[in-house]
Image: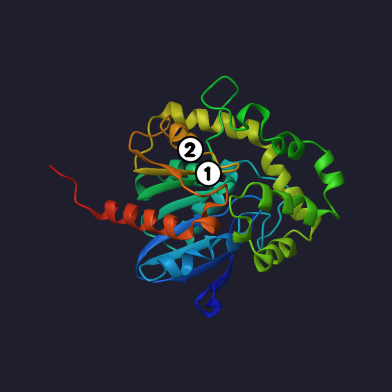
Amino acid sequence: MSDSPESIRHLDLELSDVTLHVARAGDPSGRPIVLIHGWPETSYAWRKMVPLLGDEFDLVMPDTRGMGGSSIPDSGYDKVTVAGDIVEMIERIELDRPLIVGHDWGGTIAFFVAAALQERASGLVVLDTTVPQPPGVGMSMNQGGKRWHHAFNRSALSDLLVPGREREFYGWFYTEFARHPEAIDETAFGVYMEAFADPRRSHAGFEMYRAIPQDELAAERVRAAGPLRMPVLGYGGAESWGRADEVVQSLRQFAGDVAGGSVPDSGHWIPEEQPAFLADRIRAFAHRLDAPVAS
């Protein structure tokens, strides 16, 4: 996962209805940070955070259900269920008030983890995604159809056409959604292609898109319940297919304490394209969470 793979500890955690593969690194006595990857990636997406944040923080990086080294349930790819896996993981390994960070679909999952934990989470960081909401409410997650793959992945065609063409299909996203395509180098590409060699994992990813209507309704329930009760940070890539300031705008519909903005010189893959920028912002945010509240 990093230049020092011996620093990564791996475990397979058997939960209620899934086995999660979890990579863990950094200072076991530090503040826990749960890093949730997006699509089409695995926990390997956080490899560049390990040398940048591992000196101070306990980094916990699960593969979400169906992805990477985790088991592949037949169902349960709506983000509330996937978030439930992460909450159960947090409770099982006894993480105390973790900071929840997510990128892409991992950002949506992180949002629902934070909504479930509330005060039991110290903060939330969402990267280059918006919270799904029903049509006509809030922001369009697929940007009015610009993100064509939302419709394609939800259709039966994705399961018919992608198997056997994984390198071409997934490679397009790693290149076209990036400001710096070299950030996902041949080694990383190989890791991701090995992860998606099993067509069941591609299917699991497509099921995440098919669950969007459920996610929209779930997000409305969160909004109706009142603002998230923790500080929130949001960033979107400023270039290519990055979402720029849309991330913060979306989060402000669900939380009162929201900061962030856009990441210069980055496309969608912020943890890999601009790891130093991201690590600096996460570290500063975590330190802010430690600061005493003025009376």
Distance, label 2 to label 1, CA atoms, is 6 Å
Q: In this view, does 176 lie to the left or right of 197?
A: left
Of 96 and 108, the residue lying toward us? 108
In the displayed structure, 177 sits above or below 194; it is above
- CB under 8 Å between discs 2 and 1: yes
| Residue reaching furthest to the bottom | 6
To which residue does mark 2 refer?
247
| Residue reaching furthest to the top | 136
Q: Position of residue 17 (x, y in %)?
A: 64, 54
Q: Which amino acid type is marked by label 2? A: Val
Of 243 and 228, the residue lying toward us? 243
Secondary element type, mark 2 = helix
Q: Residue at x 69, y 61 (%)?
A: 192
The figure's colour scheme reads rainbow
How crowded pointer 2 is (Cα within 10 Å; few <14, some 14-19, many 20+) is rated as: many
Q: Which amino acid type is marked by label 1? A: Asp
Q: Which residue is drawn at 53% across and 74% down?
A: 9
Q: In this view, does 289 lie to the left or right of 99?
A: left
Q: Where is residue 255 in the image (x, y as percent from the top left)?
A: 38, 34
Q: Which residue is drawn at 46% across and 47% down?
A: 263
Q: In which quarter of the image is residue 191?
A: bottom right
Image mark count? 2
Q: Quadrant of residue 114?
A: top left
To which residue does mark 1 refer?
128
- Report whether residue 62 is seen: yes
Image quadrant in which the N terminus is located = bottom right
Q: Earlier in the sequence, mark 2 or mark 1?
A: 1
- Report whether residue 113 is seen: no
Q: Where is residue 165 in the image (x, y as percent from the top left)?
A: 84, 53
